[in-house]
Structures are given as C-alpha cells and as structure tokens.
Amino acid sequence: MPERDFDRVFNPRGIAVVGASNNPSKFGFIFYYGLKNSGGTVYPVNPKEKEVLGDKAYPSVDRIPYEVDYAVISIPAKGVPKVVEDCGKKGVKAVSIYTAGYSEEGTEEGKRREKELAEVAKRSRVRVIGPNCIGIYCPKGKLSFFAGLPLLSGDVAFLSQSGGHAEEFAYKAENWGIRFSKIVSFGNSCDVTCEELLEYLGEDPETKIIGIYIEGSKNGRKFFETLKEVAKKKPVVVWKGGETEAGVRAVASHTGSLAGSPLIWSAMIRQAGAVKVEDFEELADTICAFKYLPLPRGRRVAVVGAGGGAGVASTDVCEKNGLKVVPLREETRKKLGEIVPPLGTSVKNPVDLSYFVLFDFSMMKDCVEIVMEDPDVDMVIVHVSHFDMMMKALPTMEEIVFKTLMEIKEVVKKFPEKPIAVVLSPESDFDLEIEKVKLRERLVREGLCVFASTVRAARALSNLAFLREARDRRRSTTPP
Amino acid sequence: MPERDFDRVFNPRGIAVVGASNNPSKFGFIFYYGLKNSGGTVYPVNPKEKEVLGDKAYPSVDRIPYEVDYAVISIPAKGVPKVVEDCGKKGVKAVSIYTAGYSEEGTEEGKRREKELAEVAKRSRVRVIGPNCIGIYCPKGKLSFFAGLPLLSGDVAFLSQSGGHAEEFAYKAENWGIRFSKIVSFGNSCDVTCEELLEYLGEDPETKIIGIYIEGSKNGRKFFETLKEVAKKKPVVVWKGGETEAGVRAVASHTGSLAGSPLIWSAMIRQAGAVKVEDFEELADTICAFKYLPLPRGRRVAVVGAGGGAGVASTDVCEKNGLKVVPLREETRKKLGEIVPPLGTSVKNPVDLSYFVLFDFSMMKDCVEIVMEDPDVDMVIVHVSHFDMMMKALPTMEEIVFKTLMEIKEVVKKFPEKPIAVVLSPESDFDLEIEKVKLRERLVREGLCVFASTVRAARALSNLAFLREARDRRRSTTPP
C-alpha cells in the first residue's frame, strides 16, 4: 500500500481540480467554485481552458509550479488513469474521484475499470478516495465539497459511503449544533477504505465523535476489528445502508457494495461497542446527544412536561425504545406535590404540570431539579408541549420558555451523569413554525440538546445508555 | 340516557362559561376569552363578578335571559353538580367540564364524585362531556377551546381523550393543510362517550375523515362495533395511548381509564377496518394523506429522487414499513434512460438522478410521470434531497423546485389510484429552515402532501394501502 499521509491530505498546501470548468453546468465548475469559496489554495487543471474563474489553468497536474497535496478529479473515466499518474509524478498525496461508471454500474467493464484504477494508484504512489464520491470536507484545511458549507471547524467526523449523505449532514449540521473536523465521502473505496479512515480518525486529536454511513465493506473482518478498537476511544455511531432485500439491491446500484446480512451487521456493530442507528435523523440526534449530554448510569427516565396525553405518549415512546419510565420515590413525589397544584396534574412519572405552565412556566425548572435529585432517575425528558397555545395566548412566553430552558441547562451541571433531553416539535401553523426555528436556533447556540419529537429524544437517550453499558462491560472484562 | 341533540351543541345559539373570570391566571378567563375571540354568543356566569371582559355576568346559568345550548364549566368540583342542575333547568343541551379531581385521581372520593356527576347529568337531562377535558372546538359553530385557533372550518374531525392532544392538533393542523369540522376533548367520559361521538361523526355530513386519540373505553365491545360501522363509511385513524406497561400506568393517572391489552387493542382496531397509528406525527401525516391522496391498489412503491444514499435510505424505510420497492419494468427503465444521464445515476428502483437535478430539476417531473405509467407501480415517493446544496448554490432553485412540484401535482390527476408523497425534510441550517417553512407553506396551500421524512411518508402510504385493503376485503366478503 502506498505511504499514507492523511494529515497533509486534510491540510493540503495546494489543491488541484482536474476538469475545472467555467461552465456552471459542469461539476468541474461546482468543485472549483466550492473550494475557492472555502479559501483553499486551489489550481484549475483543464487543457482546454486558459483560465477558470479568472485563475490561470494548467494543462496537467504535473505542470502546476506549486506544492499540490490533494486533487479532485471530475473528468470522464477514460482519462482518469493518466491523471492519477500525473499526480504521482507531482507528489500529490491523494486524489478524490467524482467520476462514476465503475463497479457501481454492475458491468464487467465497470469492475475492470475500477481494478485498473486501483493498480494505477498503487503504481503511482497516490492514494485514491472513491471513485464515485465527492471527496473531503475539512473546514480547518479549507477543503469543502461545495460552496456554502460552514467554514468553521468542530470535533465531529463523518465517514460516508454516500456523497449525498455526506453533504447533507454538512449543510444541515447547524440544526443540531454540530460542526465537523472532517467529512470524507469514500464512494466505491477502490483504494482508501473506510477502515483506514476510521483508524486515522481514532487517532485524530481534532475528532471526538465519529459518525459512519456504510453500505458494505470488502473486508468485513477488518472493518469490525477497527470499529472495536476505535469505539474504545471515541463514541462511534454507525448507520448501515441496505438493511432490507430491496435496500441491498439499491446499494449494489449505488456504490457496487455487497451489503451483507443486515442481522449480522447489526449484531457486529453493537458487539464492537459502536452505536447502530436507523436513519439520518437518528444519526444526527445521537451525535448531538454525545456532544452535549453525559452518559447515564442506567435506562430509568423521568418525563416532565405539560399535558397528560403528551405524558402518556412520551411514556409509550420511551418504553418502546428501551428506556424505563419508573415510579418516582415517595420523597420526590412529595417535593413535587409542594409546587405542582393538586388537580388535573400528576406528580407520578410522567410528571404532568397540565395547563399550569401557562401561568408559571418556571415551575418546569423546579420540577426538573426535583426529579433529577431522585436516585432512581438516570435521565430526564422535558417536553415543551402547550407551546402553541402559550405563544398564541402571550407572545412573551417565548422569552419565558427560553429563560426556563436555560435554567434547566444549569441544573444539568449539578448532575454529571444525568442527561436531559428537551423536546420541542417543529410543527405548528406556519407563522409559529418560523418563530420556533428562531427559538431553536437560540437554544442550540446555547448548547442545549433540542429534539424534534419524543421518539427522537428517546432513541438518542437510549443510544447514550447503550454506549455507557458497552464501556462498563469493557471495563468489567478488561484485566486490571 | 338523556336525549341527544349534538347538532345544537356544535352550533349553539348561546354558550355559558361558568366560572368566567377577569383574572388572566384563571382558566375561567382563558375559556371565556377564547370563545369570545372565536365570535361565539357567549355569556359569563360568575356570582362574584358584575362583568367579565366588559360583558354582563350572570349569577347562574338559569338566570341568563337568552337561549343557551352549551356551557363550559370551570369551577371547583364541589360546585359542579349544582351548575349541571341549573343547566338542566335552563334547557342547556350539553356541558363540558374542565374541572379535574374525578376518577383520574385514583381515589375512592374521585370515583364517587364522578359517579354522582353522571347521575346528576342524567337526572337533569343534560349531557356531560368530560370531566377533565377542554370540550369542543367547532369553527362553524364558533366554538373554540382557546384563543388563537383557526376560525375556518374543514372536513376532518378529531375525538381526543386528551385535551392537550386536542388543542395541539387544532393549533398545528395548518402544517398539514388540515382544517376541522369538529374536535371534541372528552376526558374521563363519565356520560358522553367516545362511541357516541363517533357514531354521530359517522353520520355528520361535514366530516369526511375521523381521527381518534383514546386511552381506554368503559365499553370496549361497543367501541369496536361503532368503529367497524363508521369505518365502512369514512376513513378512521386511531391513536391508542397506553401501549406499554408504564403507558398503562400513565393513562390511569391521566383520565382514569383502564388502558387494556395493547395487543388486543391493535388487533381490534385493524380488524374494525380503522387505521392504527403510533404517534401524533403519524396521526397527522395519515389524515393528511387521506385528505389529499387517492388509495393505492397495492403496496408497490417507486422511489424517485436525487442521491444514491437517499435512495438506499428510502428503500430501507419503505420495506421496513410494509411497502415493496419493486423492480421497474424494462420499458420504464428504457424511457427513464432516455432522459436520465447514464453515469452516477440509476434508472432502477430507487431512481437516482444524482446531482443532475442541480442543472435540470424539471427532470424530476418527467421521471415521476414515467414511473407512474409503470403498471407495476402503485405509488411514488419523491424525495427532494440535495435541496440545501441547491439553495446555497442558487437561490432561484426554490422557484424551480416549487414549479416542478406543482407540475408533479398535475401528473397525479392522470392516475386516480396512484398517490405521490413528496418528502422535504425541515432540517437545515437555521436560515434555510425558515426558507423551507415558507416553501412548505406554499406547497401545502396548493394541496400537496409534503412529508418531513421518508419514514413518515412511508408510514402514511402504508396506511393508505391498509385502508384500501380493508375496503376491498369488506367488498369481497359482503354478499351482493
């Protein structure tokens, strides 16, 4: 295997875009514009152009008279091997290849082409990411997939076999208060594998949490071994594409991967101590939870909110997702009873403040503090129901809700092992939906974990509990 | 049982609010203000006040010198029986009782009080809705729970044992393009039962679709018999609260109901030909689907969108929710191949247009039309992925997406048995989230069914298929 210098690749001194174009309907334009827009030192390569977006174009990578550590290739497949060779001559560390038409085609020709590409890469001592991928997003290294992506760095990394999921998460992450150290879209992974990238991220000091979207691996054993090692060090969240028969077929058309048995994948991911998620929302919610919330000692949850129906719904959802809505201790109920009015409410679990929150929303904070003190409670879900009614009745409620939730955030600090998940659904009439987006923005910017529904909160909390269990299990089986 | 005149109750000539107050921290204020705000002919009843919100207050209901068909009661429990008797004298058809402290308390005293209330109601020939409920929302009859609820009528009815769920749906329904004929919050249902209301709605010419949130019934047999009869006439969607052991406990504290066995409830609901849903989102999504989409002949779905990963995810989600992502016919693939560029895309099912939608989003419409023509396809999911990238790249994309989706809406008209579900996730960075709310508003106002995630679309489509199957089964077993 050629020498690996991913540090350089993620922080390149220069970037070549092969196929860079002035035509906005070409991906060569989109990549070049995106990288330039992100502040990278970028050189267009296109023998047919003198300039691209006003920058001098070069006929080939090896004719660029500056250091180039990374290249993005967006030209038809037949020209790719020659470009990889040029990159080798130039000393480029890695290329990512957007070009499709390889093994994902399902044809002999496609497979042959991919094999050839891997061989050229090896011979030229250039690492290849892809083909059929959109490469690297690394704000610190001024690498971006496309224009308009956040330029600020964070501590979450994401490895995605799908380019679409990679950019989707990059564009949407602000919603969850997530910023990235690195995202790599690795497509068909003919050379650089998910395992190798995962190993690197396991050591990467800039990465604290790792998400993975994977459709299949050519070396399942290696994948799970690496996953197990990395999961010892950092939370790893895995979303597996192709979990149904039809999904397996879709995977074959997408990245040419063999999706393998869903049941075995699920079991192996969990056995490796990584968290398995079902969809994009759960991936993002869970990473958000790992970022902002502590790991709970157990699965016993208290639900606090306004509305008996909402309490029943939350209870059902928690139990269906592996949490236990346990009875509160008598002293807890007694303390709650001192502040919660007696009628139409409940100081059992779920705690129901009913419509009294309309008149004193801060009651919510006091109740949360009381249930957090209960030794039988490992975590709390706070659902902000009746919000629509409150907002329609009294627009100043938004400030009161914000202030109370900020106070609840302070409560959390006193309980270093008890996560609190706040639930605020996005749906309302359209005017109020816009207000809710603004409120959510304020809460998220303050570092609060806000979930769009109780089921999403319950899943994320359940994943927190899983990670703690996996760690505890590891500790108890590791000789001192 | 006292005579029932629900027509009058939903369209009252006069409404009394017993306990009406000038103190905004009292529910007597909130109810009175809400009803007045909705344009109802409303009379405050409060022996301690001369005026409420500027209106002459009466010491008791029977002292109101005008017709009163409906009364809302919000006073402590001990005074309630006397008020019900007054209502009887006055000829009030029905009252709804907000007051709590009845069987939901779980005490003997609470149960006794509820029994007494039912007896007084019977004796006084007044029907009682509740107690422990928020009563009726009926925009046509100028009845509202609270201020700020939509004043326009629609064709959906909702019966909810939870007041919170009742007002939540009322406030949020615009998000799904839903308006209501009637919503009734029936709480502990000591007199007027869910079954009775359901029977009425089955005959109600203003109601086309019925949603139910129920925690338990005192007469399960009657409930299921009524459900079966009504489900023959109109789509009925049932959300059952208390589906887990802890949920059953929560239900007891909430409305004093015996939740019963979740498995039996699920089976019975489906056997009655009603659709069973799991949560509020599925309830609203499914009702939206019934309102705007036709019932499909089968469960075979085609997925059309941009992004291979999104296609894989949609496929997994469809299959997990009872839909079949079937191979497209050869002629369909051929036709798709004529407009979809060959590389990095797929004309199998899921159809993946990849990033080519950036340059020609209208391709989406042509593809949808082609897959709709495939005799093996019963329904289509269109996922608007890459939307964030498109919007960041080119703000005019919003208009192009809107125009294309409107064209897709026209396509639907040609296929009267093939529903199309459009998926547009709400998450993005916060600026774009606001743009998305505005786009969603435009789409929903044009009558498009827009789902927040593929899993939500798949569940709603699966529910459409269920209803068709139930109808077909009924037809095939009914003698001609």
Image (cartoon, coloured by chain):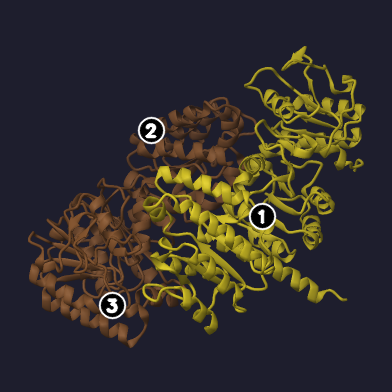
Chain colours: A brown, B yellow
Q: Position of residue B62 (x, y in %)?
A: 89, 22
Q: Position of residue B336 (x, y in %)?
A: 49, 76
Name the chain letter of the residue that bears numbered label 2. A
Q: Amino acid at mark 2?
A: Val
Q: Which residue is mark 3?
A: A218
- Image point (47%, 45%), residue name: B435
1 or 2: mark nearer the eye: 1
Describe residue A380's horizontal placement relative to residue B161 as left or right: left
Q: Position of residue A475 (x, y in %)?
A: 25, 57
Describe residue A318's horizontal placement relative to residue B109 as left or right: left
Q: Which residue is mark 2?
A: A411
A115 or A476: which is nearer to us?
A: A115
Name the chain letter of the residue that bears numbered label 3. A
Residue A261 can be seen in this image: yes
Q: Amino acid at mark 1?
A: Ile
Secondary structure beneath label 2: helix
Residue A326 can be seen in this image: no
